[in-house]
Image: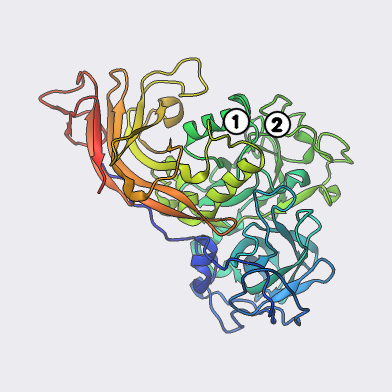
Amino acid sequence: MAMRTPSFRALALVATALESSLLLGCGESDGGLSAGVTSASSVGPGGTGVGGATAATTSTAQNAGSSGAGGAWTGGCVEVGANAEVVIATAPGEGEHALSLTALSADTDWSELGNEALVLDVLGDAGLIGHLVLHQGATEFTYGMHVGSLKSGEPLRVRVSTLSADGAEKKACVGTAALIPAASLGVNAEGLKHAPIFKWPVKKRFDDLPLMLGWSHEKARYQAVYSNENGGTVAICGAKATGMQAELARWGRGADIEGVYSYGGTEKWERCDGMKTFAQVQPGMEAEHPIFYYGDGHNRVFESRGGYGKTCGSSADQQADGDLSGWNVNNPGNQPKLDDGLVIVLRPLPVDLDALGYATFAGRREGLMDTYAPWLYRLTFAELAREGNIDQNHTFPMQSYLFVDVHAADVGGSGDSYCSFMVGSGFRLRVHTKDGETLDGPQMTASYFGASEDIKRIAIELKKTYAANAFDGLEFDAYDNDGIYWLGLGDAFMARPVARNGATLDYVHKGTSAVNTYIDDDKSGCNAGVNMGGPGAFAYPCVGGKQTFALP
C-alpha cells in the first residue's frame, strides 16, 4: 500500500493571483524598506478571488517617505508607522472575510533578541481585530489572517503596533491587499467560519507563537503549528539543547503541533488539563470562532488568562516561562475587556490538511510546514538559537538535519532514544552517504509512532551540512525481532536558509515511493517468504531485519 501523494492544493481563501505567495510562503525580496514608496495597490472592485470573490479596494494613502538599507519593494507600497493608520482594504460585502496583505518591514531577524519582528495592528470599525507579525522582516511577503465578520463597506486599517520588537525600526511598507468574503468560498467557508483566535502573552509574542493553522474538512478539526514549545517534552527531557534533542527525536520537528479544536459533532478543545467538550468547559466565542488563551508550556490552551500557573499547573513543563504579568501575577481580572496590553491576538488563516492526506493518516499533519510554509523551519531554529538551545552537540542548525516521511504499520516497542529509562523494539532509519558514512536516526517506537498504520516524520541528525546528492540510500532497520511493514517512503529533504528569516527545501527524495515489504530479524511472521498479515490483501516479501531504499 503506497502513501497518498501529498497535494499542493491550498484552501481557497485568497485570490488566485495571491494563492502561492500567501499559502506557500513565497515572496523573496531581500533587503530594507524601499526608498521609493508609492500608494498601496490592490485587485480593484472588479477583481475576483477564488470562487468569484470580489476583492476589496485598498488605501490610496500618500507616500510619507521612507528609507532603509538594502533591497527594494518590487511594486508600489505605502509606508506605515505607529502614529497614523493606513486604510488597506474595504469589505466588499457583509460577513466573514479573509485578509491577505503583502508587506515588508525594517531588517528584523527572528534569532536576534529585541529585533525579532515588527507587528501590525489590524483594525476595523469596532477597534482591534488582531495582529500581524511580520516575521519575514525586510523580505517582501504576503501574510494572511481571518478577520471575522465585517460590514459591507467597512474599511480595514493598519498601524505599527506597540507590540513590535523593542529594537526594531517602527515602520513598514504595505502593498497589495485583498479581502475575500467567505460567502464566495463554497465548502471552504467552513474552515474560515470556525477558525480559532489565539490570545498569547505579550512576553511571548515572539516565542512559541501559533503561526499556522491546518484545517480538515473531513475531520472538522484544526491543527495549530507553533514556532516551538519551551515546556512539554523539552522541559521534561532536560530543557535547552538536551530537551530539544528529545523533541526532534520523538516528533521529527522543532516546531510544535497541537490538535487544538474539533467542531464536528461534539465540539472539543485541547484545554491544558485535558480534552474538554464545550458542554464541559465553554471557551469565549466571537461568532463561531473559539477564543483560546495560552495555557501552559505544552502550548495547550485555556479559556482566559487565569489558567496559566494555576489550573494549568506550575511544574517546569507547564510553567516553563515563569511568571507572566497579567496572567498568573498582576492579573487585573480575567474579563476579555481587560486584555488590552496583556495579549497579542493571532488569527492564522486556515490551510488544507486533507490535501496532504490527513483524513487518512494523522501523521500527514507534519506536512503543513513543508507544503505551505518552509519559512517556519527557519523561524523555529532561529528561535532555538536565540534561546541558547542549539549547542552543536545535542542540537544543530536547521540545515544539519535530514527530514524523512516514513509510511509503516505494526510498529512495536516503547520509549525513545534520549528521554526514556528504556527503549525497545521499533525501528531505526539510517542514511548512507556516497562516501561510505552511515548516519543513524532515532530509534522510533510505538510510543511516538503509534501502533497502527501511519506516516511518521523522522529527523536524522547529520551534524553538518550535506549536498542533496551526497546520499545513496535510506535504510530501515527493525529491532528486537519486531516485524514491521515498511509500506512507503515519502519526502526526504533538508531545509536551507534564505535571506534573514526564510527557508527553502532541498529534496533528497520527493513524492511517494511504495516499498511494501515485511522487515523482521527472525522472519517468524513469514511463510514461504511472504507475510500476509499487513494492510490490505497483499503478499509482503520478507526481506530480513533491514532493507535499504536506493537513492539516485
Q: Looking at numbered disc 2 in the image, what kind of residue is underneath it?
A: Ala
Please say if the residues under marks 2 and 1 sit with CB atoms less than 8 Å apart. Answer: yes
Which of the two residues, 525 or 462, is positioned nearer the viewer here?
462
Compared to residue 372, the image places residue 449 above or below, namely above
Residue for badge 1: 234
Check disc 1: other Cα within 10 Å, few if <14, some if 14-19, many if 20+.
Answer: many
Q: Quadrant of residue 541?
A: top left
Residue for badge 2: 320
- The coloring applied to the image is rainbow
Q: Secondary structure at mark 2?
A: loop
| Residue that sits furthest to the top in the current view | 421
Compared to residue 40, the image places residue 417 above or below, namely above
Residue 378 percent location from the top left of the image? 55, 50
| Residue that sits furthest to the left in the current view | 528
Residue at 28% x, 36% y: name it. Answer: 436
In 3D space, how far apart are the residues under numbered discs 2 and 1 (Cα atoms)? 9 Å
Question: Could one spot residue 225 in this view of the protein?
Answer: no
Residue 166 percent location from the top left of the image? 79, 53
Residue at 50% x, 40% y: name it. Answer: 253
Q: Quadrant of residue 84?
A: bottom right
Residue at 32% x, 21% y: name it. Answer: 479
